[in-house]
Image (cartoon, rainbow, N blue to C red):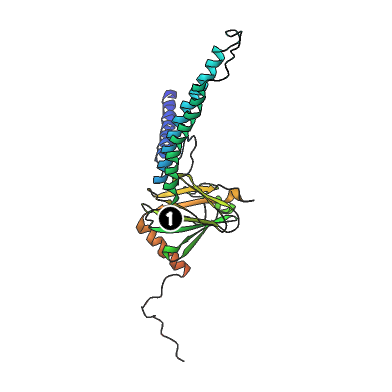
């Protein structure tokens, strides 16, 4: 009897454990936010971020080779020129070959680094054949997004209040969720125009590979082309004042039909839809 009870208890515990593993495996992580034990860059979700990762990989190889070479030289010098091996120090003061080499080689390394770096800077600087424009404005301490190509609708995005944070949904990470996200269509080249209303801010979304400092009285340009639907998050990267840490960036990427529906809904709520030609069902009052 005791053996059967023990086996029964073990069976229940294993079933509970299996249910927990299945539940955690079926849960999908929120797109575009850091995760526990994550290393390296976040997954790229724009062509620009793909190129940023490629440049990073090239630089990682170069700096690793340089570090190993310098470490080897240090260890060799410590072994070869130790006082026990060289009781009489050398009097050599110049070596023409070495002086030319350690001048020319770093220059060549910098050229190898500069070429892809400049290409990436120019690639991410201006949008080519952009389908739409979004104007990003930094305020103390929230973001506003204007859609001039969609009738001038404006979205103000603020961090959720303390009262709302206790009711967070799975797609609303703590301290990064906002009351109204910036919504973009996937597979679309979108020009980002950035400015600020009061002080400098930094519009940064790591998964997009974009980091634009927005400055009062100046327009900075960048672009994104999100390849996957989902929620993406970032934060202000400039120390802009007292509530700098309460200025998250939330972007929701949707399909193009869903984006059109969202635009119509925003226009309707803002009263931006044009008047229709359909006669009113309510007859005018008699005068």
Depicted 11 relative to depicted 214: above or below:
above
Looking at the image, residue 217 sits to the left or right of residue 208; the answer is right
Q: Position of residue 126 (x, y in %)?
A: 43, 52
Callout 1: SS: strand
Depicted 175 relative to depicted 85: above or below:
below
Q: Position of residue 243 (x, y in %)?
A: 62, 51
Q: Residue furthest right?
A: 242
Looking at the image, residue 139 sits to the left or right of residue 117; the answer is right
Q: Position of residue 272 (x, y in %)?
A: 45, 70
Label 1 Cα crowd, 10 Å radius (few <14 / some 14-19 / many 20+): many
Foreground residue among 96 and 259: 96
Looking at the rendered structure, the number of numbered marks drawn on it comes to 1
Res. 218 visible in picture: yes
Depicted 10 relative to depicted 169: above or below:
above
Q: Residue at x 42, y 24 (%)?
A: 1
Q: Which residue is mark 1?
A: 191
Res. 167 visible in picture: no
Foreground residue among 171 and 64: 64
Q: Position of residue 103 (x, y in %)?
A: 50, 29
Depicted 85 relative to depicted 223: above or below:
above
Q: Residue furthest bottom?
A: 287
Foreground residue among 286 and 153: 153
């Amino acid at each position: 009897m005791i053996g059967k009870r023990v086996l029964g208890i073990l069976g229940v515990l294993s079933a509970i454990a299996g249910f927990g593993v299945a539940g955690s495996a079926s849960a999908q992580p929120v797109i575009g936010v850091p995760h526990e034990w994550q290393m390296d860059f976040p997954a790229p979700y724009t062509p620009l971020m793909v190129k940023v990762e490629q440049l990073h990989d090239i630089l990682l190889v170069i700096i690793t080779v340089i570090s190993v070479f310098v470490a080897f030289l240090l260890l060799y010098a410590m072994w070869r020129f130790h006082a026990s091996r060289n009781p009489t120090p050398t009097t050599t003061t110049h070596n023409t070959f070495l002086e030319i080499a350690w001048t020319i080689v770093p220059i060549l390394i910098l050229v190898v680094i500069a070429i892809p770096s400049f290409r990436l800077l120019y690639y991410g600087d201006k949008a080519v054949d952009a389908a739409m424009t979004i104007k990003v404005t930094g305020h103390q301490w929230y973001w506003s997004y204007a859609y001039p190509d969609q009738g001038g609708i404006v979205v103000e995005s603020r961090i959720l209040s303390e009262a709302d944070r206790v009711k967070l949904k799975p797609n609303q990470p703590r301290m990064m969720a906002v009351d109204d996200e910036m919504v973009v269509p996937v597979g679309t080249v979108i020009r980002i125009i950035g400015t600020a209303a009061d002080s400098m801010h930094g519009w940064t979304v790591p998964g997009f590979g974009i980091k634009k400092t927005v400055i009062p009285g100046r327009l900075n340009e960048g672009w994104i082309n999100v390849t996957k639907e989902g929620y993406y998050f970032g934060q202000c990267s400039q120390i802009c004042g007292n509530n700098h840490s309460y200025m998250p960036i939330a972007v929701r990427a949707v399909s193009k039909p869903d984006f059109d529906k969202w635009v119509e809904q925003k226009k309707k709520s803002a009263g931006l839809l044009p008047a229709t030609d359909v006669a009113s069902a309510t007859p005018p009052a008699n005068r």
